[in-house]
Image (cartoon, helix red, strand yellow):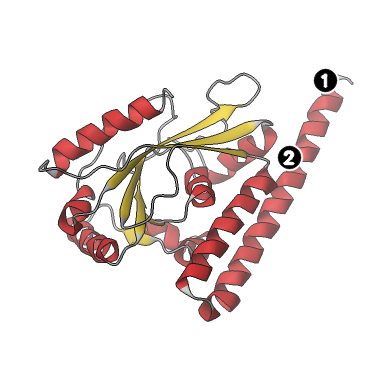
Amino acid sequence: MSVNQLAARVKLLACVKLARAIWHALMGFFTIVFIFPRLSQAQKELRVQIWSAKMLGCLQVALVVKGPSAVPGPMLLAANHISWLDIISMHAAKYCRFVSKSDIKQWPVIGTLAMGGGTLFIERASRRDAMRVVHHMTERLCAGDVIGVFPEGTTSNGQSLLPFHANLFQAAIAADAPVQPVALQFMDQASGQISLAPCYIGDDTLWRSLWRTVCTPGIAAVITFGEPQRAQGRDRRAWALALRSDIERLRQL
């Protein structure tokens, strides 16, 4: 097979994966609009987890889960942030309610999918809104929910961790809830090296990141859950530093 033929085959397979993913997203949109109103919360959570696992299948991204993923709530999951694929991967491993930037709510289809998944939206530039979200997170943790946050506040290339913002950890302190560190990595299954294909950083667009992902075979989403921990008298800043160190360690396992 010539180089041109191989390139054409890769593009064809990528288009097939992309078409399946778009169709699956539309089916998820339909489910949220027309079926979710009739379901219990537990049924919704199961649907979200199954839908997410199937989306990874559409994209042909393998899921590898390490560590204690089945710990019940209340729980705050703190994970590093690499890509739009993080939330889908984590939902496939364990349902949780994510805290995400409010802009996503306005995105066609994706906004509805996020709201159906139980996302809590935050205006990052507004200190008052951050306080509102922390209060809402505290209420949900007290009710027994599992909530996921990305304390870096933005995405990185996955090769190192950015500094952690500590504000959202105040919710776990106020609710006396544990935090579970979670390390996310996208790996090339053949080489065992980090895959940069799903990255969504800087001037990247969602489309470019998605196209790179479907054009790159053999990607695995590796999610490593650490042991849950409580504040034990630490303030949110000290706890954030400790959790960042834990996630760095988990990335080496």
- Front residue of this view, candidates 153 and 142: 142
**Residue 226, quarter of the rendered image:** top left
Residue at left offset 47%, top offset 49%: 87
Instruction: Give the residue type at disc 2.
Output: Ala
Give left or right: position of 171 versus 75.
left
Residue designated by label 2: 14
Instruction: Give the residue type at disc 1.
Output: Val
- Spot occupied by residue 30 in the image (x, y as percentages of width and height): 62, 71
Label 2 neighbourhood size at 10 Å, few (<14), some (14-19), many (20+)? Answer: many
Residue at left offset 44%, top offset 29%: 158
Q: Secondary structure at mark 1?
A: helix
Q: CA distance from mark 1 to mark 2?
A: 16 Å
Q: Secondary structure at mark 2?
A: helix
- Spot occupied by residue 245 in the image (x, y as percentages of width and height): 27, 28
Evaluate whether residue 162 shows in this view.
no
Give left or right: position of 154 versus 64.
left
- Spot occupied by residue 179 in the image (x, y as percentages of width and height): 28, 46
Give left or right: position of 241 versus 250.
left
Residue designated by label 1: 3
Q: Residue furthest right?
A: 1
Above-or-below relation of 157 to 106? above
Q: Residue furthest bottom?
A: 38
Residue at left offset 58%, top offset 44%: 207
Residue at left offset 82%, top offset 26%: 6
Q: Which mark is residue 151?
A: none
Evaluate whether residue 138 shows in this view.
yes
- Spot occupied by residue 126 in the image (x, y as percentages of width and height): 22, 56
**Residue 212, quarter of the rendered image:** top right
Give left or right: position of 125 versus 47.
left
- Work out which quarter of the rendered image holds the C terminus and state it: top left
